[in-house]
Image: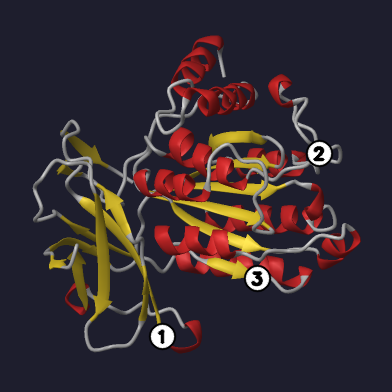
Amino acid sequence: MNRRGLASACRYAMHLTSFSRRIRIPLATAFCSLVSISPAVPRQQAPNGITGQSIKATSVAVNVYVIAEGRHGRLIRDLNKDNFELSEDATPQKIDFFSQETNVVLSLGVAIDTSVSQAHLLGVQQEAAKTFLRSVLRGGDQAFVMSFDTDVKLLRDFTNAPSELARAIDSAEINETGRSILREDATSPAGGTRLYDAVFLASDELMRARLGRKVLVLVTDGEDQGSKTNLQKSIESAQSADVMVYSIVVSDPEFYSLMGGTYHGDTSVRKLARETGGRTIRVRSIEQIGPAFEQIARELRSQYLLVYSPSNLRHDRSFRRIQVKVRGHNYLVRTRSGYYDHSDERTETKRLTR
């Protein structure tokens, strides 16, 4: 990133409105130190996979990405618009646009846990993550790579180049010291896994301004330690930026046994997935890491897109609850739990191309 871009990014990071000044400054400093090693974010791609059409894109048009599952987790791919019922705050809504096999431009983030607890797993995770990105990214899609331990590090900003993403993934290293690279955190206790901070920064700083599908994949044991933000704030940041959070949860039981600690499970990342329309995949052995990435790739190719204009016209920035059902079936339907109203923001017309 050039000096002008870095200065702009740092100024933006210093205005994280969700935090008190005491918490906001360390997080902003961390972001500035990370973004300086990456090139500028390319100009935003157009959403919705619609070629050569001009549509009026407003904040009151709500995109809802849906996965439908039958028995034993079988993905249901043959539904049409009339199969779906959609409501907002228990009020039925009219589906204005429907896509059966979504080709919506994808903004994808992969965030890798590099805390000491993942030392025996990192190599396998890196190889699986590189294969995943090569298989998922298409022409207009872009991805970034980050790692998190006592710090959140942006290893590569948005790009469509698999080789650059692969180099970024390979550059992830276990923080053996357990110490932060930031001066203000140098006296803090060693150790930490800033999972919630990673979700917040990925959503609020990297994903918020982008269009189309936005997906963050966490590779972690699901434990958070030392984040400046909390679970609820990280969920709210993802919901506000329309980010779906997937987690591949893999832990090393031997590590926790040797350290005399207790593994608290994956409750937090399961809530992140449930509220944002993603999924948590619990990996029981190191051999299952690759198939877990493959499962996420299949889901990203099997999403339905439902677009509606809310009947609630109040411009109150409230959280609106979404519910989607499939008529006549007991399918499990996964989608985000809701969205934050931004209907008072600027309206503009865009020409959409893939």
Q: Secondary structure at mark 2?
A: loop
Residue under label 1, please give it. Answer: 70
Residue at the image point whose x is 26% and y is 68% from the top = 323
In this rendering, the label closer to the viewer, 3 or 1: 1
Instruction: Check the image and report above or below for 183 versus 320.
Output: above
Residue 56: name its quadrant.
Answer: top left
Residue contact at pointers 2 and 3, CB within 8 angstroms: no
Left or right, residue 137 beside residue 347: right
Instruction: Categorize mark 2 by other alpha carbons within 10 Å: few (<14), some (14-19), many (20+).
Output: some
Left or right, residue 162 beside residue 352: right
Residue type of the residue flagged with mark 3 = Pro
Q: Nearer the viewer, residue 237 or 217?
A: 237
Residue 341: name its quadrant.
Answer: top left
Residue at the image point whose x is 22% and y is 40% from the top = 342
Instruction: Check the image and report above or below for 21 versus 138.
Output: above
Query: Which label's residue is closer to the chain start, 2 or 3?
Result: 2
Residue type of the residue flagged with mark 2 = Gly
Left or right, residue 179 beside residue 87: right
Residue under label 3, please give it. Answer: 291
Residue type of the residue flagged with mark 1 = Gly
Instruction: Check the image and report above or below for 117 versus 314.
Output: below
User: What colour scheme was applied to this rendering of the protein?
Assistant: secondary structure
Instruction: Categorize mark 3 by other alpha carbons within 10 Å: few (<14), some (14-19), many (20+).
Output: few
| Residue 178: mark in rendering | 2
Q: Secondary structure at mark 1?
A: loop
User: x, y (%) of residue 185?
Assistant: 71, 26
Q: Nearer the viewer, residue 269 or 295?
A: 269
User: x, y (%) of residue 312?
Assistant: 10, 53
User: x, y (%) of residue 137?
Assistant: 52, 51
Residue at the image point whose x is 31% and y is 46% from the top = 47
